[in-house]
Image (tube, rainbow, N blue to C red):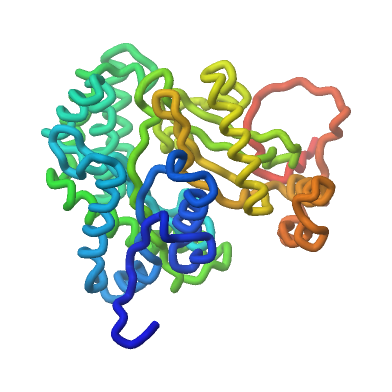
Amino acid sequence: MEAGTATKWVYDFAEGSRDLRALLGGKGANVAEMTRVLGPDLVPPGFTITTEACVHYLRRGAPPEGLDAAVDEALARLEDAAGRFFGDPADPLLVSVRSGARDSMPGMLDTVLNLGLNDVSVRGLAAVTGDERFAWDCYRRLVQMFGNVVQGVPGERFEDEIARVKRDRGVQQDRELDTAALQELTACFLAVVDFPEAPRDQLVAAIRAVFESWRGPRAVAYRQINGIPEEWGTAVNVQQMVFGNRGPRSGSGVAFSRNEITGAPEPSGDFLVDAQGEDVVSGVRTPRDLAELDTWLPGVRPQLMHILRTLERHYGDMQDTEFTVEDGRLFMLQTRSAKRHARAAVRFAVDAVDEGLLTPAQAIATIDADRLDALLHPTFDATAGYDIVARGVAASPGAAMS
């Protein structure tokens, strides 16, 4: 960098690429690259705060000079792209704040969704969408996530209240709660969360919470186990919200470009109808298999399959993606090289060469040699007869003892 040149702390998605992974983190670099490959109509706009800003914050206990101004400028550009304003009481722009380490650390760092709502703008969102329940569901989720992630209120405290309200109303699932129930829950949550009404204060607190999550116990342990340097830090991604919780034609899911357990060429994954992305990974509801997209919204599955093939060809590797459908429209939120079983890794490498996707040398480089030990474990004979007593996702190499 030339003397006198100010450090660039923030990059719009349209400015980044996968070549800037060390600076933008894996998620930020891949979202930027995905925007280039798929186009802005499929990837909601946003910006990334660099890993350098995180490292500065963690070392000095304060954000670097110029970061706040850079975020304000990036937010103004995002408002122009979205056609609405952050904090507008009548038609608010809502954003997510997500982590993004250089190497994937799934579930170890923090996320806050639906930032920008308060007691006034929730009513504006209800009016502009014509869906009061949806607006209060977003507000309830925001206060819950803000309390847990930013202020450290134990998640069980919120879940206990949700369970109580569901019992009182005789329902089983969160999505069955009506507007009045969501308003009651939000009031309960606000009683235990010091929640800032000003959206800008919400955003600042969420960004700092993501920075802080880099040195949380889960993240520290994960880095030690996986050999990830502490000095890398995490980037922070601020992105326009798209809503999988807008009713029966909306949903969220994860999709692999190939089966991540076997390596078979058919894409795999799961999704939830009328849900935000955190619901899919939290286990609060049983997701549906990706193959059932055809029976839900027939037009979405072929579009998603085409996108998965496009991303796999572009990256030359099996992809793990996150998607949201809002009122029938598909959006892609993330892509990354898929973590996979050793069997899947070997099959992908062989198939990728056969398909002309990779050269033999490139294919071998996609296999993690440390994971090949899993192929040596004893497994069930695929031709053996058996009775099914339970179904689930395999989390071990599949060894079994009688």
Q: Is residue 283 visible?
A: no
Q: Which of 127 and 193 lies nearest the eye of the viewer?
A: 127
Relative to 374, say whether 177 is above or below: above
Q: Which of 109 and 313 lies nearest the eye of the viewer?
A: 313
Relative to 230, say whether 340 is above or below: above
Residue 36 in the image: state x and y as whole percent.
50, 51
Q: Residue at x 78, y 59 (%)?
A: 364
Q: State how many labels appear.
A: 0
Q: Quadrant of residue 235?
A: bottom left
Question: Is residue 163 left or right of 90 when viewed as pictured?
Answer: right
Residue 61 in the image: state x and y as whole percent.
25, 71
Q: Residue at x 65, y 26 (%)?
A: 391
Relative to 244, say whether 311 is above or below: below
Q: Residue at x 65, y 47 (%)?
A: 312
Q: Quadrant of the N terminus?
A: bottom left
Residue 256 in the image: state x and y as whole percent.
62, 40
